[in-house]
Image (spheres, grey):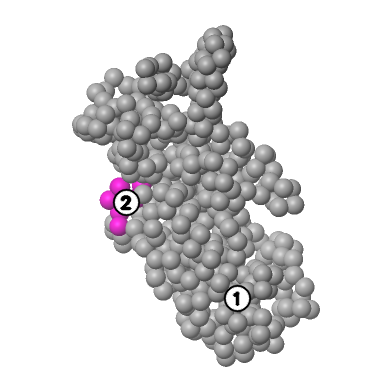
Amino acid sequence: MALKLYNTLTRKKETFKPIDGKKVGMYVCGPTVYDSGHLGHARTYIVFDVIRKHLEKSGYDVNFISNITDVHDSIIERAKKEKTTIKEISDKYTDEFLKELKELEIKEASTYPRVSEYIPQIIKFIELLIDKKYAYEKNGSVYFDVSKFKNYGKLSRRKLEEAKSGTRVDLDKYEKDEAADFALWKKSENEDEEVGASWKSPWGQGRPGWHIECSVMSKELLGEQFDIHAGANDLTFPHHENEIAQSEAASGKSPFVKYWIHSGLLTVNGRKMSKSLNNFITIPEIKAKGFNFLALRYLLLQTHYRSKQNFTWQAMEAAQKGYHNLINQIKKLGDEKGEINKEYNDKFIEKISDDFNFPQGLVITHEVLKSNLTDPDKLATILDFDKVLGLNLGQIKKEELIIPEEIKDLVKQREQARKDKDWAKSDKIRKEIKEKGFEIKDTEKGQKISPKD
């Protein structure tokens, strides 16, 4: 079944045809490691993990690159604030990022390149752009001359004048020729404060600009042209637009990337996530509030990846209950695996192959559970789906029933009501437990809880 995906570059769904047969080069913009990741990051990483897994399950050999930005103004500022080194800050949050990926069931990238490891290649790339008259040096910094690249704006659909007006800069400070020009190399302002983020170059001591890193690392690891570049849609402009300009200017080849895929914005309580609005939620906060990371993954797969998704704590609670219910239903199927059902498998592949419709993939998973297939065939079919969905359904220990904390609390309340001989309250709690998807039976060994049929 042909895979179709929405290409931001062309603004239409296209049949996926890699440059080199079954080999796929895929680059995903990773984190700037100066703080904990937030829910928007989680959505991005999960979305492109599922896309990668579907490609691999479809027989493609995916070289999956996710960069780590360990050289950035924000890291320098964080190190100054905490009176520590730039390396300690970047290492701390890199380790946190990689640990969270595992807990979110995100497959390890083929490579996690770090900017600090590619400084010589970045300098060489900038020298090439200067030689080709696409870049210029001003007082120790180097800028890309946007006016020299005739197709600037083809990804974001912004004309050059719009790009200039949408770029907020102080021209006197940066000494750029035009507001839309962007930094390839930034002069060090204070070398003593920038130890670990400052290098010698032909233009003096400094560090790379933000956009250049992805062009260089993708070129080194995937070549001058590759198949898929992915990231959150707020990176379309200026980051991805600038990547295209500098990469195609350097190589003389177009397109730099064949397919651009962008995930939609994640809001919190209907508003853009912001610390000033007090609705900024980090990934560690999910666990701190007692939620399962895989329940978060389950929640984030319920909205099409290109659509805006709104997060609320109520939705998180519902997703955790839904995830627990899914697991408990699968446990009841037993351990014996049967045959993958072709009819349901074809439906699943059809939906996921239509621009990665994860929500419909979940719908079909629940359809299988309700179907008249044998339990072994249900189990085999669902575990095959999970190779794409990544909800860790194959690692469930059958003897361990997952009981939400809310249900545990109700069981304790009912137990106390029985001790108090408050039978009316006991029956009321039993009914409430049943409404939430569980049944409770009184045995000689105490109360036994099981998922409701």
Q: Position of residue 247 (x, y in %)?
A: 50, 72
Residue 211 visible in image = no
- Disc 2 marks a residue whose amino acid type is Glu
Give neighbour class at mark 2: few <14, some 14-19, many 20+ (Cα, 10 Å). Answer: some
Label 1, label 2: how far apart the Cα atoms are = 40 Å
From the image, tell me which residue sits under label 1.
85
Q: Position of residue 42 (x, y in %)?
A: 52, 50
- Residue 56 is inside the magenta segment: yes
Horizontal relation, residue 66 to residue 285: left or right: left
Question: Residue drawn 45% across and 42% down?
Answer: 294
Image: 188 above or below 237? below
Which residues lie in the magenta part?
54-61
Question: Residue drawn 39% across and 60% down?
Answer: 109
Image: 71 above or below 321? below
Q: Secondary structure at mark 2?
A: helix
From the image, tell me which residue sits under label 2.
56
- Residue 372 is inside the magenta segment: no
